[in-house]
Amino acid sequence: MSASPLLELAGIDSYYGLIQALFDLSLAVPKGKIVCLLGGNASGKSTVMKVILGLVKLRSGWVRFAGEDITGFSTPQIVRRGIASIPEARRLFPAMTVRENLLMGAYLRSDAARVAEDLADLLDRFPRLGERLAQRAGTLSGGEQQMVAMAAR
């Protein structure tokens, strides 16, 4: 028996005004897997992300995260559950240190001990960032900046 997907979309139809952007989209992302959305310009990649984040409303279908139906939730409610988008442009705070950027990702959290545990876990996943915690994010290489952007979400 396989485990339920961490993220699942089914029967998604979404529109921008009268223009339909997504047609009966279904997608399942298993826990622990990395999935990439590929496609040309105007193929719906960004719209899928906006649907997941609750920025684009659905005409039909549903979105589940960790077994919970999040269809119709507000974007802040979705972000609090751990879903975030990492834009290509990285959008770090360049004058702040790597540590400060990473901790900005925990601004909604109140359990300092758990935040510290999660920071240690992130540094295990991205050991290069552990070597750069006191360095200003704007001075990192592009790849290192992308690591910070991914870890801070």
Image (cartoon, helix red, strand yellow):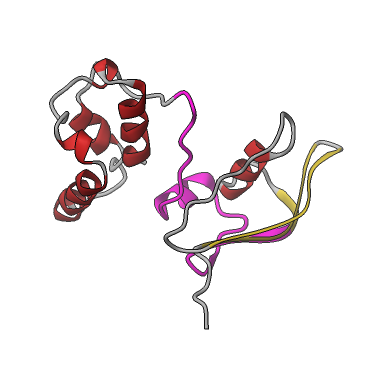
Q: Residue at x 20, y 50 (%)?
A: 115
Quarter where residue 90 is shown: top left
Q: Residue at x 20, y 48 (%)?
A: 124
Outermost residue toward the right?
A: 18
Q: Which one is in front, 91 or 15?
A: 91
Q: Which one is in front, 147 or 113?
A: 147
Measured as percent of width and height from the top left, residue 75 is found at 52, 45
Measured as percent of width and height from the top left, residue 3 is found at 49, 75
Marker count (numbered): 0
**Range shown magenta:** 61-89
Q: Which one is in front, 51 or 45?
A: 45
- Up the image or down, 93 lies above or below 119; here it is above
Is 10 on the left-hand or right-hand side of 3? right
* Magenta stretch contains residue 29: no
Measured as percent of width and height from the top left, residue 59 is found at 77, 52
Q: Residue at x 17, y 53 (%)?
A: 117
Is 25 on the left-hand or right-hand side of 108? right
| The C terminus, quarter of image | top left
Is 86 on the left-hand or right-hand side of 15? left
Quarter where residue 103 is shown: top left
Measured as percent of width and height from the top left, residue 140 is found at 27, 20
* Magenta stretch contains residue 85: yes
Quarter where residue 95 is shown: top left
- Up the image or down, 73 lies above or below 3; here it is above
Q: Residue at x 25, y 46 (%)?
A: 122
